Image (cartoon, coloured by chain):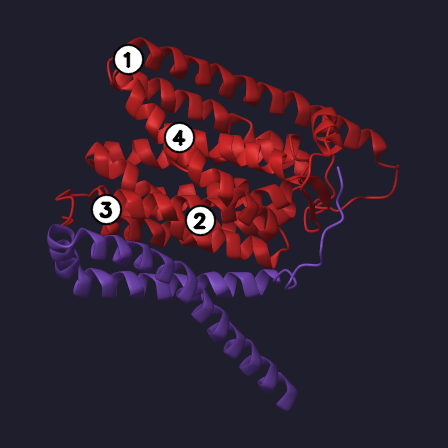
Chain colours: A red, B purple
Amino acid sequence: MTFLISHATIAAPWLIAVGFVVGILGGFFGVGGSFLAGPALYVLGLPMNYVVGTDIAHIVGKSVVAAKKHRALGNVDIKLGLVMALGTIPGVEIGARVVQALKRTKHADVALGLSFSVVLVVISTFIIWESLGALRQRRASRTGKIKTRPASKKDRLHFNSLWKWIHAIRVKPMIGLPVSGIRVSFWAVLAVSIIGGFFSGFLGGGAGYIRMPMLVYVLGVPTHVAIGTDLFEIILSAGYGTFSHALKGNVDILIALVMHTGAAIGAQIGAQATEKFHGPGIRLAFAPLPILGAATLLYELHHRGLL
Amino acid sequence: MSDSRKTPDSAPVEGSTFWLEIVVYSGLIVGYLLLVLKTLDVPLARLYERHRVSYAFAAVLLILLQGIVLELLTKILVGLFRRDGGGRRRTR
C-alpha cells in the first residue's frame, strides 16, 4: 500500500511483522528496538529521515502498552521514571546537538562513533560475565530438593560493588524509591538519565540498551523493575521525540500505526513472558542487544561514508 | 540487591485471561487501524502539508489513543466476558 505522507509503498503485513518482533523484544527487555526496526524500515523502502521519526512514534505506542502491562505486574517505579525524565530530555537535546556539531568535523564523528561501539561491546561482555556468575551463584545456593519457581523475581547480582558505592554517596537530596527498594542520591539518578538521554539523542531511538543495564548495575534497581521503569521512561522521551520529529516532517504516523498493530500485541506477550524468567536469565538474554547497538552505529558510519 | 517491592497494583493475569485479552485486543487494534486508514489518511496528509503543529499533536494523540484507549476497552470487554461466564456457571 502507498502511504500518502511519505509517499512510500510498503506491504502492511511486513510492517506488522516487524512491529510484532520489535514489540516482543520491547516488552521483554524494556528497549525501544530501534536497532532492529530502523534498518528494517529502511530496507522496506522508507526514506531515512522518515525512518528515524516514524520509528520513534511507534516506540511511544508500544512502550505505553508494555509499560501498562509491567505496571500491572508491579514492575514500574513511576517516581524513579519521573525523576529520570528531568535528565533524559536535556540529555536527548545534548546528544542531538553533539550530532549537529560533529557533522562539521568528520574525524571526531568517526572517533566518537568507534569509542561508543567499544563501550557498547564492553557493556555486553560485562553483562554476559556478570549474569553467568549470578546464574552460577543461584544454582549453588539452591538447596537440594527445594525447587524455586522460574517465575521468581528475586534478583541476584554477581557484581554488587558499583551500586553499593553509589548508594553510599549521601549527597542531598536523597530519594527513597520503595518500588525499587532503594534509597539513592537524586544526582546519581540524574546522571544516569542524562547519559541515557545523550545516547538516545546521539544514536536515535530509546537507548534502552544502555539505560536498562545502568538502572540495574549503577542504581541497584531489580531487573524486572528496571525493564518496566525503562519503558515508562521511554514513553516520555520518545513522546517528546515524536512531537519534535513530527514538527520537522519526519513522521509518517500511518506507517507508525500499522507497525504498532503488531508491536502492541508483541509487547503484551513480551511483558507477560518476563514473569517466566528470573533477573540473571533476562540479563543474559539481553547481553547481545548492546552489540546490536554497536553494529547499528558502525553501519551508520559506513553508510555516511566515514568508515 | 534489594527486592522489597510494593505489591502489584493488580494481580498478574491468569494464562487464559491473558490470551483472551490478546485476542480481544488484536480485534480492536485491527479495527482501529482500518478505521484510521479508511477515514484519516487524506485528512492527515493534508494536515502534514498545511499545518505541521496540528499534525504533530494529531500524531502523538493517535498513537497514544491506540495504546491507552484500546487497552482500556479490552479490559472492560474481557471483564464483561468473565462476569458473563461466571454468572452462567453460578446459575447451573
- The earlier-in-sequence mark between 3 and 1 is 1
**x and y, in percent, of residue A253 in the image:** 25, 51
According to the picture, the residue beneath numbered tag 4 turns out to be A94
Q: Earlier in the sequence, mark 4 or mark 3?
A: 4
Disc 4 marks which amino acid? Ile
Q: Horizontally, is A246 left or right of B16 in the view?
A: left
Q: CA distance from mark 4 to mark 1?
A: 17 Å
Residue denoted by label 2:
A235
Q: Amino acid at mark 1?
A: Thr
State the CA–CA distance, disc 3 to disc 1: 27 Å
Q: How many marks?
A: 4
Mark 2–mark 4 distance (CA, rounded to whole Å): 19 Å
Q: Chain of mark 3?
A: A
Front: mark 4 or 3: 4
Q: In the rendered image, which residue does mark 3 sit on?
A: A247
Question: Measuring 18% from the left and 62% from the top, which residue is drawn there?
Answer: B40
- Between disc 2 and disc 3, whose residue precedes? 2
The crowding category of the residue bearing disc 3, from other C-alpha atoms within 10 Å (few below 14, some 14 to 19, many at least 20), is: some
Chain for numbered disc 4 = A
